[in-house]
Amino acid sequence: MSRFERVRERLRRAYESGRDSVRSRRTRPAELPVEAEVASPTSPGPVAPPAATVVGAPPPTEVHASTVSRDDADVPHALRIAAAWSWRLIVVGVVFWALIRVVGQVRIVVIPLAVSLLFAALLAPAVGWLLRLRLPRSAATAVVLVGGLAAVVATLTLVVSEFIKGVPELSANATEGVRQIQDWLRNGPLHLSDTQLNRYIDEGTRWINENTSSLTSGALSTAATVAELLTGMLLVVFATFFFLRDGNRIWRFLVRLLPVAARWKVDDAGRASWETLGAYVRATVLVAFIDAVGIGIFLVAFDVPFAFPLIALVFLGAFIPIVGATLSGAVAALVALVDSGLVTALIILAAVIGVQQVEGNILQPLIMGRAVAIHPLAVVIGVAAGVVLAGITGAVIAVPLIAVINTAVRRLAARRVPDTPPDAVVVTPQAP
């Protein structure tokens, strides 16, 4: 044996000897102290082993499973939970605020896309019907879209022509209505004198003169508003065409951008949300049509001017739940008041209230069903937020957006495996 091998053998024996001694110390039971002596500055006393219990010492602080240090254990559990919820809600609020700011900056694109989604959900069954007749997809989409645009243009043309035809008669009736209001202010419970009436009229005229510059500046920006409106309308038309023709392909492309583990649930939630949106839009159109017919019967029966424009206004107002139909009905009652007097206006108002009650208590629960049922408080809050963020368009989009989000969150939170699509290829492992 060489010298190098002898040195290596000695090192190995020394290592094994040290390892055996360490193992024996670990397996040897700890010796308990005989008696704990009283510690003093000069005689600190024996040190208790880790497993020993020192008499008179405070119990150790129990560390909760949710804490990472003993300092966190000193904070009450309820306060820790409240703090955890607080910072998470702050993060969610900041993200939501940033999202609203981004949407506000590009609203000229976001709002037309949202409107085009509503039109696509409304017209999708017609496209599907034409596809079942063996019509090519592009041709079917073009036929449905052109037909929808023609119906909208014809309706707007009829409304505008009826409005222009009835303006002179309404102006004369409005003048008579103003005179009756003045007589009521003089002889009614207020007993206003001619001097007070003239003073109020002069103050109104002065306010108009003082705000002429602001009104003019608002009119000067009309060109930009018209340009944005035309751009939005073109974007709505093109986006609706491609949503109807390639909507399924666009959705599959977006789903493929997600992680593989999330694709199934997101696809299931998205398709359920699209069904909810389609059901909501079609039910809203049906309810709006019934509202317009119900109120229109009374307008025609009492020979109220602008009957057809008011019917169209009621139909469009019904797309804003609760608020829109009420406001449009109030406009109809006001026109009846100016033209036909107080009794006719009260009858029209009663008809509007009756139709609204039938709609809210019978039609909407029966037509829309539980799939798109939303609490009235959520509807009112959503409409108010939509008006603040995007005006009338925001009020129209708010409620279907809430319905879609409600369905998507419920599907994502559900602990279920989505159904396997019919074209999926399932690969099973082979036994070795």
Image: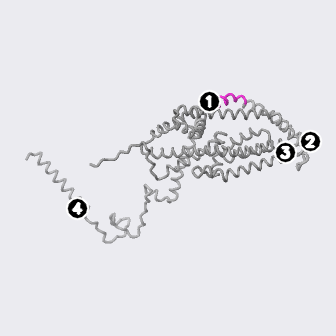
Magenta segment includes 302: no
Query: Could you tell me residue 229's position as x and y percent?
Result: 65, 31
Residue sitting farthest toward the left? 1
Dot 4 amino acid type: Ser
- Nearer the observer, disc 4 or disc 1? 1
Determine whether the residue tagged by mark 3 lies in a helix, strand or loop.
loop
CA–CA distance in space, label 1 to label 3:
43 Å
Determine whether the residue tagged by mark 1 lies in a helix, strand or loop.
helix
Please give the label number shown on residue 194: 2
- Nearer the observer, disc 3 or disc 4? 3
Q: Which one is in front, 93 or 157?
A: 157
CA–CA distance in space, label 4 to label 2:
114 Å
Q: Earlier in the sequence, mark 2 or mark 3?
A: 2
Please say if 303 is above or below 65: above
Horizontal placement of 336 versus 406: left or right?
right
CA–CA distance in space, label 3 to label 4:
109 Å
Q: Earlier in the sequence, mark 4 or mark 1?
A: 4
Magenta segment includes 224: yes
Dot 2 amino acid type: Asp
Q: Which one is in front, 88 or 221?
A: 221
Determine whether the residue tagged by mark 4 lies in a helix, strand or loop.
helix
Please give the label number shown on residue 341: 3
Query: Could you tell me residue 157's position as x and y percent?
Result: 71, 32
Name the residue that disc number 4 marks.
Answer: 24
CA–CA distance in space, label 2 to label 3:
24 Å
Query: Could you tell me residue 19's position as x and y percent?
Result: 21, 56
